[in-house]
Image (cartoon, rainbow, N blue to C red):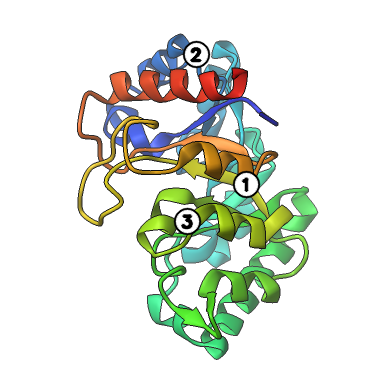
Amino acid sequence: MASPLSVQLYTLRDQMATDRDGGLRRLAEIGFGAVEPYDPTADPRGFREVADDLGLAVTGTHAYALLREPDRANAVLDDVATIGASLAIIPGGIEHEKFTSVDGLREVADLLNGIAEKTAPYDIKLGYHNHWWEIEPTIDGRHAIEVLADLLAPGVVLEIDTYWAAVGGADVPALLGKLGDRVVSLHVKDGPVRKGEPHVAVGTGAMPVPQILAAAPNATRIVEFDECATDIFTALKESRDYLIGLEEA
């Protein structure tokens, strides 16, 4: 594993709103070594202090505000830097229809490449995170995200949500092989691979997790639950134990 096993904090969004420090402490106690915030603008200095005290690295951050509030890009990037992230990820927010044609994908690429020009002076890489709508459309037999990858500037990277890629119809290990080094991080999830149903602990659902991880051996592993079928901290611990076990096998 190239970096500490991480958790996307959207998983704990309810607790983060009421007891951020307690939620981070539970993650450290479970044994996670890193986190991926979803809003770097929420008390960035306080967040960094707590994360440092708990020994939690920041593997990157979602930064939706870079897309939605372009006139505040410098302030947002100051916050990204403050929390200690060198990777800022756009986690969606672009019209789904843009991913159904080459012209639309060119518009998406131009948008992301333009944002990347703003992140570069901060030594922050820009990434894009998929859901199913970048996977379902195919163009000349290729998933839309494959076409998008060819249109992105070399420094723009991808965070592949492996679960939503599967929901979108991809053979996820094969897709990761095609995208290659463009993929720097993976959202590792498990469940029934159907829209609208909750996730389960990694290793207990239908996802071919070992094959997925083998297809992107250097990508950061980030556990995430959009919704959870069981107690969230129990599911996080089971996921962590399973993934560490795979690494040690």
Identify the residue under disc 2: 31
Res 248 → quadrant: top right
Name the residue at 60% across, 59% down.
73
Name the residue at 20% across, 34% down.
229
Viewer-side label of 3, 2: 2
Q: Residues within 10 Å of mark 3 (few under 14, many from 20)?
A: some
How far, Cα to Cα, is label 3 from label 1? 22 Å
Where does residue 169 sit, x and y in percent of width and height? 40, 65
Mark 1 element type? helix
Decide if residue 20 is on the left or right side of residue 88: left
Mark 3 element type? loop
How far, Cα to Cα, is label 3 from label 2? 26 Å
Name which residue type carries label 1: Ala
Identify the residue under disc 1: 215
Q: Earlier in the sequence, mark 3 or mark 1?
A: 3
Viewer-side label of 3, 1: 1
* Numbered mark located on residue 91 in the image: 3
Q: Is residue 63 visible?
A: no
In this rendered view, identify the residue nearer to me: 154 or 172: 172
In this rendered view, identify the residue nearer to me: 191 or 22: 191
Where does residue 88 sit, x and y in percent of width and height? 61, 50
